[in-house]
């Protein structure tokens, strides 16, 4: 049995990124769709002086740049 590649679901808030979950691509795509939907629904209802620009993306674990992403938790798998 082949080992499946691990991916990270990354949250980008105004250019600052953090990994919010790791796992298989299919399960992360489902979570990303839910988060995108929730973000779109609440974006219209929130009135702030400086609204946050939030986006999500999925990236293979082996491509995550540890040097340039300081919000990466030290103990994250």
Image (spheres, rainbow, N blue to C red):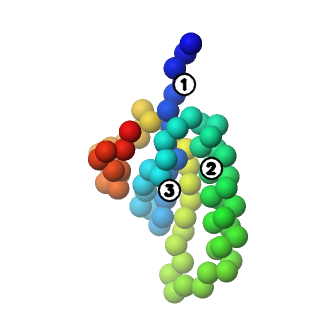
Q: Position of residue 17 (x, y in %)?
A: 43, 56
Q: Position of residue 59 (x, y in %)?
A: 51, 41
User: Relative to 16, is 66 above or below?
Assistant: above
User: Relative to 52, is 67 above or below?
Assistant: above
Q: Tag 1: Cα neighbours inside 10 Å, few (<14), some, or many (≥20)?
A: few
Pick the residue in front: 68 or 41.
41
Q: Sequence order check: which comes first, mark 2 or mark 3? A: 3
Left or right of 46 in this view: 63: left
Pick the residue in front: 57 or 20.
20
Q: Which mark is residue 11?
A: 3
Pointers 2 and 3 in contact (C-beta within 8 Å): no
Q: Position of residue 61 (x, y in %)?
A: 44, 36
Q: Secondary structure at mark 2?
A: helix
Quickly name the residue at label 2.
31
Q: Secondary structure at mark 3?
A: strand
* Residue at 56% across, 35% down: 24
Q: Position of residue 4 (x, y in %)?
A: 54, 24
Question: Marks 1/3: CA distance?
Answer: 22 Å
* Residue at 51% across, 86% down: 49
Q: Secondary structure at mark 1?
A: loop
Pointers 1 and 3 in contact (C-beta within 8 Å): no
**Quadrant of the rendering where the N terminus is positioned:** top right
Left or right of 34 in this view: 12: left
Pick the residue in front: 75 or 64.
75
Question: Marks 1/2: CA distance?
Answer: 18 Å
Quickly name the residue at label 1.
4
Question: Marks 2/3: CA distance?
Answer: 12 Å
Tag nearer the camera, 1 or 3: 1
């Amino acid at each position: 049995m082949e080992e499946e590649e691990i991916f990270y679901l990354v949250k980008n808030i105004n250019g600052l990124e953090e990994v919010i979950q790791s796992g298989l691509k299919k399960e992360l795509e489902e979570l990303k769709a839910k988060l995108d939907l929730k973000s779109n629904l609440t974006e219209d209802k929130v009135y702030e002086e400086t609204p946050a620009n939030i986006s999500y993306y999925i990236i293979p674990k082996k491509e995550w740049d540890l040097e340039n992403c300081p919000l990466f938790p030290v103990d994250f798998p």
